[in-house]
Amino acid sequence: MALFVDFNFSSSTTVLAAAVLLLVLYLLSVSYISKERGKEPPGPRPLPLLGNLLQIDLKRPYKTLHELSKTYGSVFTVYLGTNKVVVLAGYEAVREALVNYAVEFGERNVSPIFKDLNRGHGILFANGESWKELRRFALTTLKDFGMGKRLTQGKILEECGYLIQVIEDHKGNAFDTALPINYATANIISSIVYGSRFDYGDPVFKNMVKRANRTICVSGSASVQLYNMFPRLFGWIKNRQVVLKNVEMNVRDIKNLINHLKETLEPGLCRGLVDCFLIRKQKEEDSRVLDTHYNEENLTFTVSNLFAAGTDTTAATLRWGLLLMAKYPHIQGKELDKTCKSHLKRMWVIRNTTLLIWVSPRTV
Ligand code: HEM
C-alpha cells in the first residue's frame, strides 16, 4: 500500500513537473516568436516549438517552400522547429542576395549534421578566415592542375577508356550506370587531388565512393532534418550514427592516403593538390607562421569535401545527360554533330587516341 501511494505521488509530481516545463517552453517560444515576427519578412504563422513543421513536406521541403512563395513573395520566413529560416525563392532574389550583397550573405549556416561531418574544418561547411584561405588555395591549385581547361583532357580521356571497358563488358545489355559513372568521376577528382587514379576494384576506393553517396543521401533524410532542428533531442537517430561512422572511416582512409604521399613527397614537385598543401604547410612551419590554416585537419576535410562535392554532382549531371540522350535520340545525334563541329580542333586530339569510337562513330 505504501508503495502504491509512493508511486502515485511520484508519478503525479512528474506529470505536474512536465506540464510546468511545457508551459514555460510554450510561453518562452510564443514570446520569442512574436517578438521576432514584427521585424522579419512575412511568412505563415508558426506554432510554438514546432514552428511551421506541420505545414512542410519534410521529404520534399522545396515543394512546400515553392508553394509558400506564391503567397508570401520571393523573400519570406518559415520556422523549422524554433529555427528561423529566411527563404529566397527564385533567380532574382538569390542573385540579389548572393551577388549584390555577397559579403553580408557570405557566411554559411552550418547545420548540426554538417558540424558533425566537418567539425568546422575544410571548405564546404566552414566559415571565416580558414574557409577563405582554403577556398582560395583550392581554386588556385585546381586551376593550376587544369580543372575546366584542356589540361585535364588527358586525365578525362584516360578515365573514359576505363569506363568504356566497363560499358563494353555488359555486351549491349541494360545495366545501372550509377556506380561506373561515380567511379569514373571520383577518379578524375582523385587524379587531381592525390595525383593518381584508383583501380575500380580497389576496396578502399569502392568504400570511399559508397560512403560519400550514402552520407549525401542520409544527410537529406527527414530524420536528420529533425536532428538539425532539435540536436539535443535527436542526437541518437540512426542516420546520424551512419554519418558519424562514415566520417570516422573517411578520416582514417584519407589520412592513410596522405601519409603514403608524405613518404614519397619531393619538395618542388606537386603530383596533386595534397602535395601542394603539404609543401605549403612545410613552408609556413619553416617561416614559423603561428595562425596558419595549413594543418592536418584542414587538409583531411578539404580532400574529403572535394571528393564528395565533386563526385556526386558531376556524376548526377552526366547521368541526367545520358538519360536525356537515350530518351531523345534525335537530339543525341544533333548534339553530337554540334559538339564535333564546334570542337573540331579538340576532336583532332581525341581522334589520335584509341577512344575514337566512343566520340561518334558516325561523324569521325
Ligand atoms: C555539375 C557539377 C557541380 C555542381 C552542380 C555543383 C554545385 C555546387 C553548389 C550548388 C555549391 C554551393 C555553392 C554555395 O553555397 O555558394 C557548390 C559548392 C562547392 N562545390 Fe560544387 N558543384 C559541382 C562540381 C564540383 C566539383 C567538380 C568540385 C570539386 C572538384 C566541387 C566542389 C565544391 C566545393 C569545394 C564547394 C564549396 C565552396 C565554398 O564553400 O566556397 N563542385 N557546388
Image: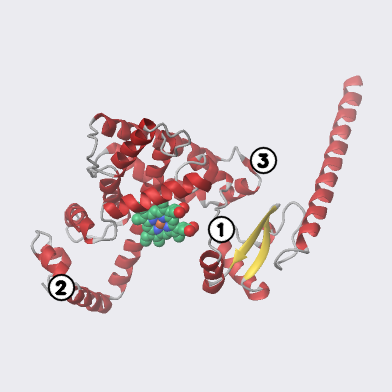
The N terminus is located in which quarter?
A: top right
Spatial CA distance of label 2 from label 3 is 59 Å
Residue 6 in view in this figure: yes
Mark 1 and mark 3 lie on one chain; the one further toward the N terminus is 1
Residue receiving disc 3: 233
Measured along the vertical axis of the image, is residue 336 above or below residue 206? Answer: below
Relative to 81, 102 lies left or right:
left
Contact flag, marks 1 and 2 (Cβ < 8 Å) = no
Q: Residue at x 88, y 34 (%)?
A: 12
Q: Earlier in the sequence, mark 1 or mark 2?
A: 1
Q: Are marks 2 and 3 in contact (CB under 8 Å)?
A: no
Q: Quadrant of residue 156?
A: bottom left
The residue mark sitting in front, 1 or 3, is 3
- Please, which colouring scheme is shown? secondary structure
Residue bearing mark 2: 344
**Camera-nearest residue between 41 and 157:** 41
Quadrant of the image where one finds ligand 1: bottom left
Disc 1 residue lies near ligand 1 with CB under 8 A: no
